Image (cartoon, grey):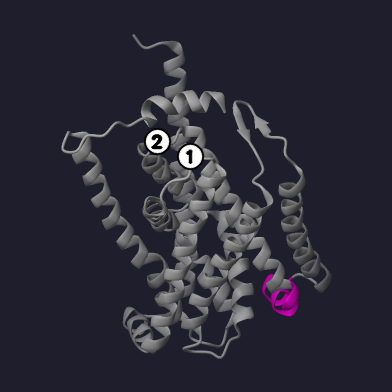
Amino acid sequence: MTTTQDQNREKTSARRRFWTILATLVSVGLGGYLLYRTLSGYSPGQLVDAVRALPASRLLAAGGFAAASYLCLTGIDWLALRAAGKPLPYPRVALAAFISLSLGHSIGFAGLSSGAIRYRFYTRWGLGTADVAKAVLFCGVTVAVGLMALGAVAVLVHPGLAQEVTGLGTGAVLAAGLACAAFVAGYLALAAWWRKPLTFRRWSIEMPPLPLAAAQVALGAVNFALVSACLHQVLMAVSDVGYLAVASVFVIANAAVLITHVPGGVGVIESVVVHLLPKTDVIGPLIAFRCIYFLVPLALGLVAFAATEAVFRWRDAGGARSPTPSRTAAPGRAARS
């Protein structure tokens, strides 16, 4: 018989699914509207011609920066598992990280969607629920501190552009840049001096040691710098725009994406870049950027995900059965965390 506790869990799970689906639909709708507003003045033929007009050298360079960004992201996952005290061989981490992030970037709510995919991989390799949660949190914090670190540099070095794009005054822009820098510095200070675990209900979280925290900031900032370089390469095909200008705009766009959770930043990035270059036809470069950084990795990630799922199912069916300690060990570790 179903107990009252089981019924309450089912109701809670149903409510979470409802709100997740609703938020996703709202985000997709917002992204679709922004994308429509940006592309509505072009025919399909004009869009295809705009992409074809881009030099192959720029597209190859953009692809190289995109690949370097995803490589950097696998390094963040590798650090996250070390911080959680559950290191895994890098090839396994790279596989799980690439699949989860290539899909999560396009699905939206990347922390939840990519986290769910990470959970499926890492628990099969012996990690508990609490271990995966700590690793996902570490990755999320890395994104935040990396974005703030690059944002502080871009805004403080190029305050005029940030003022133009945001419409804020000089004082407000400089204050925002200094606040980002102060947040990063404060995080590093906590990592250096705060050794007590932070507890919330049954979860216990410890600050990473200073070397890991410094690596977080560095890898997070480098990742956003590489994505900005990818966007910069395609924009250079139509305009002599500076890298710092593109980095500033990309940081602003990603801050908006983190707030709205629009899948892949659809429409948000386009709208901000069009604002940066209002008299330049940037539609072709933006479509190329979206294909290079989002759609190609998405296709590769789907293929890799399908292949690994087939292998997992084959092993579970007995073709090469191996014990799955996560299904028995995870609850105990999670309860003790």
Magenta highlight: main SS: helix
User: Which span of residues is magenta-colored?
Assistant: 156-167
- Mark earlier in primary sequence (1, 2): 2
The dot on residue 126 is 2
The residue that disc 1 covers is 132
Q: How many numbered marks are there?
A: 2
Specify whether residue 159 is painted magenta: yes
Q: Which of 26 and 178 is in front in this view?
A: 178
**Would residue 281 be visible to someone looking at this image?**
yes
Q: Quadrant of residue 52?
A: bottom left
The residue sitting at 48% across, 67% down in the picture is 69
Q: In this view, does 128 lie above or below 24?
A: above
Q: Quadrant of residue 316?
A: top left
Residue at disc 2, secondary structure: loop
The residue sitting at 52% across, 80% down in the picture is 232
Q: What residue type is labelled 1?
A: Val
Q: Split into 4 quadrants, where in the image is the N terminus?
A: top left
